[in-house]
Amino acid sequence: MLLALWRACWGDGLARVGLLLLALALCAALLAPWLAPHPSRTMFDPLSPPSAAHPLGTNDLGYDLLSELLAGARTSLTLATAAALSSTLLGTVLGTVAAYHRRLGWALLRVVDVFLSVPRLALMVLVAAFVRPGMGTLLGFFVLFGWPSVARIVYARALAEGQSEYIEATQAVGASGRRIVWRHLLPATVPLAFTRFIAEMQHVIVAEAGLSFMGLGDPTTQSWGMTLSHAMRYPALLISPVWRWWALPPGLAITLVCLALTLLQLGLDRLTDPRLAAMNR
């Protein structure tokens, strides 16, 4: 299933561009310890302009900004992948099981309605103000507030699949509910779940940057959001050329990754929705 989905994505033009851009960002994150020109948190002359020794210059503490950017890529992408994967798996399993067991589905939808009635980012800001900041806390936030939207969409897809004739035939021959859920309903939701995984990754990257920018992230952790937050606290940022090598690169990195995920999601939408596929022929 996943191999067929990968081949289909590679055959779509938009999805292929998104995959290439995302692969570039992932390679930069994985190879950060070897690509970074200087060890993390090594101090040099503060506010040095870009040079051969420091391609993106240094910040007000003397940290090499290219090394900070690469280290931030590892943190931001690892957090986004872990949070999106966890929330997608949880929402997919709960949504599929609830679609087969109607009483459980009614209770689950009421819980989902409560979560979806409040804007996620606003609720995260409220909760983050009363808990200890850290990557573990942010991961817990994103999983807790991310699975309901996945469960709602997967529930609808699994419910429609459960009314198919082959499911009725499977029930008629005496297949157990567990077998129907795990062998038939759950695989049918994989393409849709993968689309939601991409959307959740995009949300986590933007939300982490926003929370860190507001001072609700972990100040001891290097991420794109924390780099932007630190840059914006510098008084002369916008009246000096420092913003070009301090605030602009992490902003462009976030934009590039979000663009890659958007292109990949658009390609997946065309693959999973026959109406969109027909419009693009």
Image (spheres, rainbow, N blue to C red):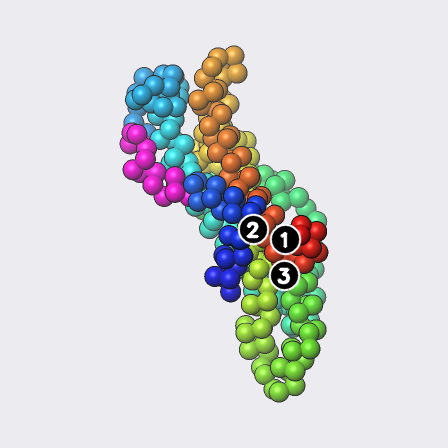
Magenta highlight range: 26-40
Secondary structure character of the magenta stretch overall: helix
Residue 81, image x, y percentages:
47, 49
**Callout 2–callout 1 Cβ contact below 8 Å:** yes
Q: Identify the residue at horizontal 39%, vertical 23% (top origin).
A: 56
- Determine contact: label 3, label 2, CB under 8 Å: no
Image location (x, y in percent) of residue 53? 30, 22
Q: How many marks?
A: 3
Q: Secondary structure at mark 3?
A: helix
Q: Residue furthest top?
A: 239
Given residues 261 and 204, the one toward you in this image is 261
The amino acid type of the residue labelled 2 equals Asp
Q: Which residue is mark 3?
A: 154
The disc at residue 12 is: 2
Residue 39 magenta? yes
Would residue 168 be visible to someone looking at this image?
A: yes
Residue 246 on the magenta span: no
